[in-house]
Amino acid sequence: MVNQQDQNLKIGIALGSGSARGWAHIGVLHALKELGIEPDIVAGCSIGAFVGAAYANDQLDVLEEWSKTLTWKEIIGFFDLSLSKGGLIQGDKLFKFIREKAGDPDIETLSRKFGAVATELNTGREVWLRDGPLFESVRASIAFPGLIAPSYLHNKWLIDGGLINPVPVSLCRAMGADVVIAVNLNGDLLKNTPKTVVLDANNPKSVKDNEMSFFEQLSTPLKIEINKQKEFLASKFFNQDVKNPGTFEVMASSINIMQDRITRSRMAGDVPEIIISPKLSQLGLLEFDKAELAIEEGRKSVERIQSIIKEVLIESY
């Protein structure tokens, strides 16, 4: 066990982007706690900001319990669909639910230092969100381009921080961390070949619920809501042609490639003391109903390198 309090060592954790794979952050944080390591400083990007906010707000156990109960119907129920506000999903339903469950404290009142990374849409500049209402900052950090609508905050349109700083080591250091633990969710993604989704637009109910992918399930309420003209757009977005990848598949894979390259570049210039890399390439971007799998792999990713973690921290004292 490492006793960081006795050594007055400020440990920071940089929780990276990765959509549904981000549930692994919960397992990472629990496994670190079992080693006697509880970061004082939390910097998060996208889903890392979401989980990091729960941790900094002492709500990690609540988030874990909720994430493990999520079903397809509940996930889709949070999606306020629209094609007119800069994203397919607005996110208002989800964050209304979160505020009702966890409140929305100001970042300055949290028990740990917290910061989220977002990207300014008009300039591409990196924005660090370290004050004000907690979930407004998280909402800005998770605004995945094309999927979740941008957030207007501090007189700026903000989108997903993963476009510019997927694993925010630099923010951790800026907030005073002596040692930074980086959690990179994207390191093994390019080894995975994404599956092509085939939809039956004329009979969407013909596929059994337990065999339906996220996109197959989402296509049904989407088409009901936006009717004939938008039905055509949705079918193109989610792909009905086995010969060609769907629009979302292309967009998501492209962002994965970009984030992997940016992460490597950023961490080469600002090297964290410890890098934890859960192996979750088999998990799709929006498979949020597989929290148990991701959380368990988060734990395992810490266990695989626990001897290194202890050695690095001992050397840092």
Image (cartoon, rainbow, N blue to C red):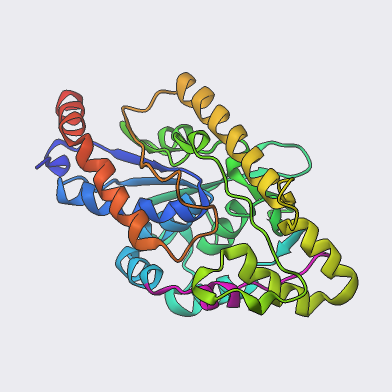
Kindly tell me whether residue 161 is visible in this rendering. yes
Q: Name the quarter where the N terminus is drawn.
A: top left
Residue extending farthest top: 269
Q: Position of residue 224 (x, y in %)?
A: 76, 79
Residue at the (12%, 42%) spot, across then down: 3
- Kindly identify the residue that appears in the image at 31 percent across and 27 percent down: 273
In-image side of 58 versus 74 (left or right):
left
Q: Is 15 rendered above or below residue 80?
A: above
- The image shows residue 64 at horizontal and vertical percentages of 34, 66
Q: Look at 37% across and 41% down and name the residue there.
A: 279
Residue 209: image location, x then y, percent: 54, 76
> In x, y percent, where is residue 18?
50, 47
For the point 76% across and 37% down, which residue is it?
123
Residue 152 visible (yes or no) = no
- Examine the structure image and report whether residue 84 is included in the region drawn in magenta: yes
Furthest residue in direction right, as rendered: 229
Tell me if 38 is positioned left or right of 71 in this view: left
| Numbered circles on residues, count | 0
Q: Is residue 154 above or below residue 76?
A: above
Q: Nearer the viewer, residue 210 or 221?
A: 210
Q: Is residue 113 left or right of residue 117?
A: left
The quarter of the displayed image where residue 316 is located = top left
In the image, residue 4 lies in the stretch drawn in magenta: no
Q: Using the image, determine if residue 294 lies above or below residue 161.
A: below
Of all residues, the one furthest to the left in this rendering is 1
**Quadrant of the snapshot with the C terminus:** top left
Q: Is residue 189 left or right of residue 79?
A: left
Q: Nearer the viewer, residue 297 or 106?
A: 297
Q: Nearer the viewer, residue 219 or 163?
A: 219
Q: Which residues are magenta?
A: 69-85
